[in-house]
Amino acid sequence: MRDYWPTCGFRLLTTGTDGQLRVTDEFLRSLLERPELAPVPESCAAELALHQDLLDQPRRAVDEARLALLADEDARANYAVWLRFRTRLLARPTLEASYLQLFRGNVDVPPLFVHQLTQVLLRHILGGAATPFEARAAEMLFRPQRIALQEGQVMAADDETVERQALSASFGSLGDLIRRSGASLRTAELDVLTADSADGYWPRNEAHDFVVALNHGQPALAALCRVLERWVAHFLGVQVTIAPEGEIDDDQWVWHVGLDAQATAVLNALYQGEEVADAQRERMLCLFRLDFTEPGVVRPEVAGRPVYLAMAMDEQQRLRLKPQNLLLNLPLARQA
């Protein structure tokens, strides 16, 4: 059993008898220690007092009058964001339910917090028996990826790590690959996760510095399918199988879900019979087929039919997956 991503906050939560996560005071305190909220030498007395009061009682009510006492405008704004996020976290009995509720209506939570919750939930769902490929594939759901295309190979690297490594003086073969793909990088030195190097993921599990191949037949793509299957099962209570698909050759195409904004736009256009620009088609990275183990859980018009999924990079060759799309847009007969 592996303990990975230790700083994400998963260990500060509790699990109910239903297998769902509960928000704790310890988890809320950890959010208060983030750089956006942690006091700095310039913090005024009112800010220091508010921070300490919230550490003592993380669920304490804070009104606008008290926020107005903070001298620093950025500090006032950051606390307002945190308090709104706290409200969203505590709006439902479980973290899973609160997470789903975030996306029903206007999303007013910064991506930073959404990504942290996604990571925490994935850590819970995958458990300690995750394989290195599953853990690395799961990173794609909460960390944007930089895509490099070279001689038919589709390589995904952590976007933030690529930018950071680009500032170093070292240079590796993958850095050359990414640079030739069009990214504006000086250097990059990253390792490719393979069957031989897989165990090296664990001591570097929070470095986010392994690159994976996303071509059909590659273990990382298969692992991504398994992660998405478990993501759906945990939240929606339905069993599905997901596998890469070469193309949509289906006269009875009835449902699809884009796993990111780019793929959603392309799938919607194709479904409506509209023309799709060559540049958009070329940015499509992978197509998947999702099948329900029990057809009776879906709407009658979709029963027995597959749901097509897709992911695509944007014009800057970044992949920004939105795993919530898979939870909110499946054609279930009943909603979770």
Image (cartoon, grey):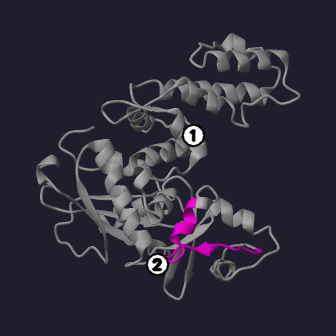
* Residue found 62% across the figure and 74% down from its top: 191
Residue 300 x, y percent position in the rendering: 11, 50
> Residue lying furthest bottom in this view?
151
* Amino acid type at image mark 2: Asp
- Give me the disc on residue 27: none
In the rendered view, would you say 144 is above or below 116? below
| Segment colored magenta | 186-202
Q: Mark 2 or 1, which is nearer the eye? A: 1
Mark before the other along the chain sequence, 2 or 1: 1
Residue 59 x, y percent position in the rendering: 56, 17
Is residue 71 visible to the viewer in this orientation of the structure?
Answer: yes
Tell me if 63 is positioned left or right of 271 in this view: right
In the rendered view, would you say 163 is above or below 178? above
Tell me if 325 is positioned left or right of 208 in this view: left
Which residue carries the number 2 mark? 278
Q: Which residue is nearer to you in this view: 21 or 236? A: 21
Quadrant assignment, res 180: bottom right
* Amino acid type at image mark 1: Phe
Residue 315 x, y percent position in the rendering: 58, 68
Asked if the magenta segment contains residue 193, the reply would be: yes
Q: Which residue is nearer to you in this view: 6 or 311? A: 6
Q: CA–CA distance between discs 2 and 1?
A: 35 Å
* Residue found 69% across the figure and 36% down from its top: 34
> Residue lying furthest right in this view?
42
Which residue carries the number 1 mark? 113
Tell me if 264 is positioned left or right of 31 in this view: left
Is residue 323 visible to the viewer in this orientation of the structure?
Answer: no
* Residue found 67% across the figure and 73% down from its top: 183
* Residue found 66% across the figure and 14% down from its top: 64
Give the SS element for disc 2: helix
